[in-house]
Amino acid sequence: MSVRAGALALQGDFREHIAMLKRLGVEAVPVRSAAELETVDALVVPGGESTTIGRLARIYGLIEPLRARIEAGMPTLGTCAGMIFLAAATTGPEQPQLGVLDAVVERNAFGRQVDSFESELDVAGFDEPVRAVFIRAPWIAKLGSGVEVLAVVEDAAGDDPRPVFVRQGNVLATSFHPELIDDTRIHEMLIAMAREG
Ligand code: GLN
């Protein structure tokens, strides 16, 4: 099946995701309206600023259409701010979120130690680690029982490992930025889910 993928293009680095998806040979388009959302088989919610993405989604009337498509099974990948927007809540003040990922996220969670960093991350099911780029990244503070953890970061303070890559059915979410590295495996996961129907 030929897949048409979308990147939510309200704010953030949706262009890098579109470029990555095109490298995989799929049609990839920006999504800014409910009508455009209807035309895609899979969606990326990019990194950026999650409160801005949420507010713009509200203004553009996209909250309910997004929730409906994702709940109906559309394969979706949220990265960094995108992960926050997909989640149920944050540990901070309320902000617009879709609640399609049963998780509570802590924004800028690594920021107390360092704003941005890269790390070689072991991912469940991958033979080789992923070079993960974290930029003012969230981690998952609380996780529902139906959410599978695919990668964690060990905290220097010796606290519990923090989930940074999770899957809940058709929803994938990363704290880091797979669109910024020369490695297409995470986008391939999304497209494979769309091909499986
Ligand atoms: N700190 C941003 C937020 O909380 C996320 C940063 C990113 O997407 N790189 O929304």
Image (tube, rainbow, N blue to C red):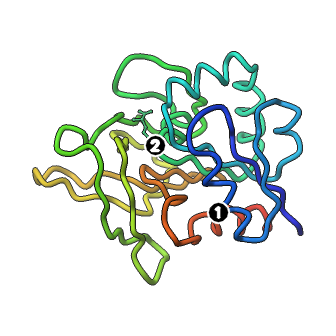
The numbered disc on residue 20 is 1
Residue at horizontal 42%, vertical 49%? 175
Q: Which residue of the protein is positioned furthest toward the left in this rendering? A: 157
In the image, 136 versus 70, the foreground residue is 136
- Residue 136 in picture, x, y percent from top left: 34, 41
Left or right placement of residue 182 versus residue 131 in this view: right
Question: Cα distance, mark 1 to mark 2?
Answer: 30 Å
Number of callouts in the render?
2
- Residue 118 in picture, x, y percent from top left: 31, 61
Residue at horizontal 78%, vertical 29%? 65
Residue at horizontal 63%, vertical 45%? 14
Count residues near mark 2 (Cα–Cα under 10 Å), then give few for <14, some for 14-19, many for 20+: few
Q: Quadrant of residue 8?
A: top right
| Secondary element type, mark 1 | helix
Q: Which residue is mark 2?
A: 144
Ligand 1 image-quadrant field: top left
Left or right placement of residue 56 versus residue 115 in this view: right
Q: Is the residue marked 2 within 8 Å of ligand 1, measured from its CB?
A: no
| Secondary element type, mark 2 | loop
Count residues near mark 1 (Cα–Cα under 10 Å), then give few for <14, some for 14-19, many for 20+: many
Q: Is residue 73 above or below residue 62?
A: below
Q: Mark 2: which amino acid?
A: Gly
